[in-house]
Image (cartoon, grey):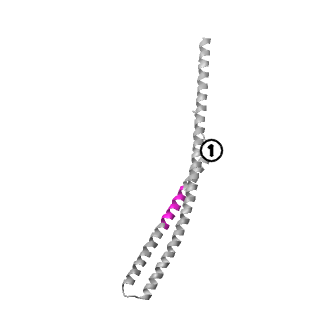
């Protein structure tokens, strides 16, 4: 029986590699988003600790210097939180770009796999037609031999 050779197998292999690369980039972008969100959570925790310290300073013996330093620390934390939120927005944008690239790579791979399947079906039909032709020729030959005898 004839062996099936897909003429565009190298393209299909390339599409599979591109999809794998897109999956890796998506995973890296997703990890970056998670890392940035963890940093934001840490900033919120630090801000809460400073706020708690500020409350304690107001209830204790009033030390203007400590209150001012803690108030400044809370304001700095708020600024850092806003900056971190912006980093998260950028990371989410990168994640969405990676998601779209992955989606496109998957669609291209699926398209080429479908083309390969169609080519294989056509190959099977051609092989079947060839086998049927050989059988018909064999039957005709045997029928002709039987008539001569």
The residue located at (49%, 78%) in the rendering is 76
Expressed as whole percent of the image width and height from the top left, the position of residue 88 reads 52, 66
How many other residues sit within 10 Å of disc 1, few (<14), some (14-19) or many (≥20)?
few
Q: Nearer the viewer, residue 17 or 36?
A: 36
Question: Vertical placement of 23 versus 73: above or below?
Answer: above
Expressed as whole percent of the image width and height from the top left, the position of residue 39 reads 47, 70
Expressed as whole percent of the image width and height from the top left, the position of residue 138 reads 59, 21
Q: Nearer the viewer, residue 96 or 57?
A: 57
Q: Is residue 2 visible?
A: no
The residue located at (48%, 82%) in the rendering is 72
Q: Name the residue beneath numbered marker 1.
A: 8
Q: Is residue 48 magenta?
A: no
Q: Nearer the viewer, residue 45 or 124?
A: 45
Question: Vertical placement of 74 versus 134: above or below?
Answer: below
In the rendered structure, the answer to whether residue 109 lies left or right of residue 48 reads right
Q: Is residue 32 magenta?
A: yes
Quadrant the N terminus occupies: top right
Please tell me in which quadrant of the rendered image residue 6 appears: top right
Please tell me in which quadrant of the rendered image residue 129 appears: top right
The residue located at (41%, 88%) in the rendering is 63
Q: Secondary structure at mark 1?
A: loop
In the rendered structure, the answer to whether residue 63 lies left or right of residue 28 reads left
In the rendered structure, the answer to whether residue 40 lies left or right of residue 101 reads left
The residue located at (60%, 45%) in the rendering is 9
Expressed as whole percent of the image width and height from the top left, the position of residue 54 reads 41, 81
Report the magenta residues as a range: 23-36
């Amino acid at each position: 029986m004839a062996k099936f050779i897909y003429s565009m197998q190298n393209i299909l292999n390339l599409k599979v590699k591109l999809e794998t690369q897109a999956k890796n980039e998506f995973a890296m972008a997703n990890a970056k988003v998670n890392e940035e969100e963890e940093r934001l959570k840490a900033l919120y925790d630090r801000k809460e600790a400073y706020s708690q310290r500020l409350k304690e300073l107001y209830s204790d013996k009033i030390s203007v210097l400590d209150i001012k330093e803690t108030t400044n620390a809370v304001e700095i934390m708020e600024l850092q939180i806003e900056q971190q939120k912006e980093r998260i927005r950028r990371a989410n944008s990168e994640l969405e770009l990676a998601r779209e690239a992955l989606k496109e790579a998957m669609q291209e791979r699926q398209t080429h796999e479908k083309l390969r399947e169609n080519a294989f079906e056509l190959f099977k039909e051609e092989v079947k037609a060839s086998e049927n032709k050989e059988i018909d020729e064999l039957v005709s030959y045997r029928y002709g031999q039987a008539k001569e005898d």
